[in-house]
Amino acid sequence: MWEKYNEEDEEIEDVIEESFEILDEKPKKRIRRTKEQKESEDYVSKDEMWNELFNYYVSLGKGYDWENQKVIDRTLFPNISDKLTGIINDIATKMGYRSNFCGYSWIDEMVGDSVLKMAKAIRDCSFKCYTIAEILSETNENGQEFISYIDKKEQAQKKPKEDSDTFFEENSKKYIKFKANPFGYFSRITSHSYLNRIKKEKLAEDTKRNFQTETWEKLYASETFRNVRRPKFIESDESDVVFEE
């Protein structure tokens, strides 16, 4: 009996000592994830999305003009790949996790609208795979080359130089042609569709409240409703409810 008790007592003491050792350990430092880790682990890869869109445009064949980057034959609708479908679904769903969108009750409608808008953008080929911009300057920072260019809004932007970038001159000016960011483009479509759904739902709620208010005001103003004798509710006790005649 005592031997059994001593063995159990020793096991309890070992557990207590281990718990104190854990408490004495210093808290681990928080390690920030790099941008590459976030893209590979948690969210959409811009390169994979760009490749899927590029393959979709290639499947159009002669129906897509690569020089002007626009669709020619709008009667051709090849199937959107399963991978690209999953990508736009992830963008639409995870946009709803943001603090400015997650509190609305019509989140499913917002996700559905954004998926529909993105699918339509893919079918219309509204996203341009390549961006052509005028080069302002080329700099070298910490062993990495950066290129400053002018975007469509005539604002100066800077990007790291990549192997896929191509350069050419036109009218004694230097230009760069690089891969556009599909994730930013379709995220903007998603946020706009979310906001449009919020406006529609709020307008519907305001219309419903205004209709209810006008209806009750007309009823209160009418003689038939005014002469109706309504029972008075008197609460004398929690269990006893009396209606006054």
Image: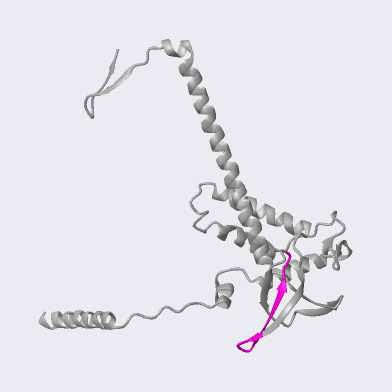
Left or right: 163 in relation to 191? right
Left or right: 216 in relation to 134? left
Q: Which residue is situated farthest in the bottom direction here?
A: 143
* Principal secondary structure, stretch drawn in magenta: strand
From the image, which quarter does the C terminus lie in?
Answer: top left
How many badges with numbers are in the image?
A: 0
Q: Nearer the viewer, residue 48 or 167?
A: 167
Is residue 149 located in the magenta-colored stretch of the structure? yes
Residue at the spot x=77%, y=57% of the render? Answer: 123
Q: Position of residue 160 (x, y in %)?
A: 67, 80
Is residue 69 located in the magenta-colored stretch of the structure? no
Question: Is the residue 117 above or below the residue 31 in the image?
Answer: above
Q: In terms of image quadrants, where is residue 80? A: bottom right
Question: Is the residue 103 above or below the residue 66 in the image?
Answer: above
Left or right: 27 in relation to 86? left
Question: Is the residue 118 above or below the residue 204 in the image?
Answer: below
Left or right: 31 in relation to 44? left
Q: In terms of image quadrants, where is residue 144? A: bottom right
Q: Nearer the viewer, residue 82 or 127?
A: 127
Residue at the spot x=46%, y=18% of the render? Answer: 220
Magenta span: 140-152
Q: Position of residue 92 (x, y in %)?
A: 61, 58
Q: Position of residue 205 (x, y in %)?
A: 54, 37
Question: Is the residue 88 above or below the residue 205 in the image?
Answer: below
Residue at the spot x=59%, y=50% of the render? Answer: 195
Q: Position of residue 188 (x, y in %)?
A: 64, 59
Q: Which residue is situated farthest in the left direction here?
A: 2
Residue at the spot x=10%, y=81% of the render? Answer: 2
From the image, which quarter does the N terminus lie in?
Answer: bottom left
